[in-house]
Image (cartoon, rainbow, N blue to C red):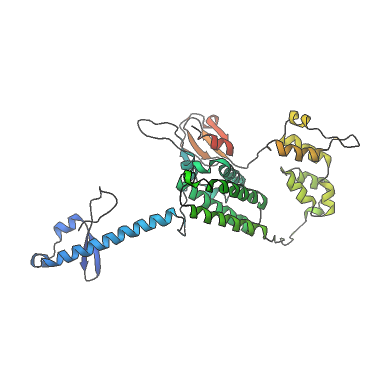
Amino acid sequence: MPFLGQDWRSPGQNWVKTEDGWKKTTADDKNNNVPVDSFCKVKEPECFNKENLLLSLNYDMAAKKRKKDLMNNNTKIPYFYREKWIYVHKGSTKERHGYCTLGEAFNRLDFCSAIKDTRRFNYVVRLLELIAKSQLPSLSGVAQKNYMNILERVVQKVLYDQQNIRPIKELLQTLYVSLCGLVQDMGKSVLVGNINIWVHRMENILQWQQQLDNIQINRPTPTGMSLTELPASLQLNIMQRLADGRDLVSLGQVCPELGTLTEDRLLWKRLCQYHFTDRQIRKRLMVSDKGQLEWKKMYFKLSRCCPLREQYGDTLHLCTHCHILFWKDTNHPCTANNPESCTTSLSPQDFISLFNF
């Protein structure tokens, strides 16, 4: 009895019942190795065929169940792609029909390993946040499922490392607000899948938020000189490396000595000049009673109406010659004479805009 599968082009399979159990034979084995009893007994093959038919139907139902569990996010171990680079094609050619979408790029690129890299972690988190704001409905069902799996990995990493807690809280809040609006429009085919699946995912988001709120930071064992034991000039030099004003405020709450240093006007002036242009600063000048500029207040006022400058240790790059999207430290098969001149760095917003056809 040939195996009944999803693909009508399959050559078929034969199953023979032996003393050791059922064994699969090919068409050549069927022609060459024919048992002698088959010429004498006529009714047994019919029984075998009936049993084979039932088994093939059971195998078919099991395959459908595995596929359904995979789509319903019931699998215990999700599959992640490990491709370091992908070819971005925006039109149809004779060799290839179709184009690369945001969901396809998000599925095929190795974001699972990228979140383990400290240089790429903030880049991936920012990309997840931008997708949560506006691009989630444009992803395919597999890409949406992969998005949630990567997000779960990010939360697990933050809970284990006890670092980058605030940006992940903001990401989860943004995603939850977006899903609240999208789930209400499920009848308009905004999201792929059953509404119960997305309700369950929203419950997971609330559970992750609660875990992040209840996290207890473990103080490391002191092995050397602490930050407060350094000279004030070195402490200010370290504070100048912080690109977010909220980190400075949190650092100033550790002890009164650090709180005094974080109020340094020159520190907030450099932070404003790093994130904003001179024109933006001139529009929102704030002067104190002593006639001095309030750089700290100006920073938080500007940050509410102007985007902050983004800085990442490693980003995705696009080769304009080969149309290949790759990570910076990953080599790709470039055919240009000078590959460095054809490479452009992509911010998370540029990555999304790359697939706006």
Apparent side of residue 238 relative to residue 288 in the rendered image (left or right): left
Asked if residue 335 shows in the view, the reply is yes
Q: Residue at x 8, y 65 (%)?
A: 39
Q: Residue furthest right?
A: 290
Q: Residue 138: image x %, image y %?
A: 49, 41
- The quadrant where residue 123 appears: top right
Residue ranking furthest to the bottom = 19
Residue 83 visible here: no
275 relative to 252 in the view: left or right: left
Q: In the drawing, does residue 107 fall left or right of residue 64?
A: right
The residue nearer to you, when weighing 32 against 147, is 147
Asked whether, in this view, residue 22 is left or right of residue 116, the answer is: left
Relative to residue 205, is residue 106 depicted above or below?
above
| Position of the N terminus by quadrant | bottom left
What residue appears at the point 58 percent right and 52 percent down from the top-left corner? 154
Q: How many marks?
A: 0
| Residue 217 rendering spot, x and y as whole percentages | 70, 60
**Image location (x, y in percent) of residue 287:** 85, 35
Q: Is 357 rendered above or below residue 133?
A: above
The residue drawn where x is 77% and y is 32% is 281
- Residue 244's spot in the image, x, y percent? 72, 44
The residue closer to the viewer here, 226 or 150, is 150
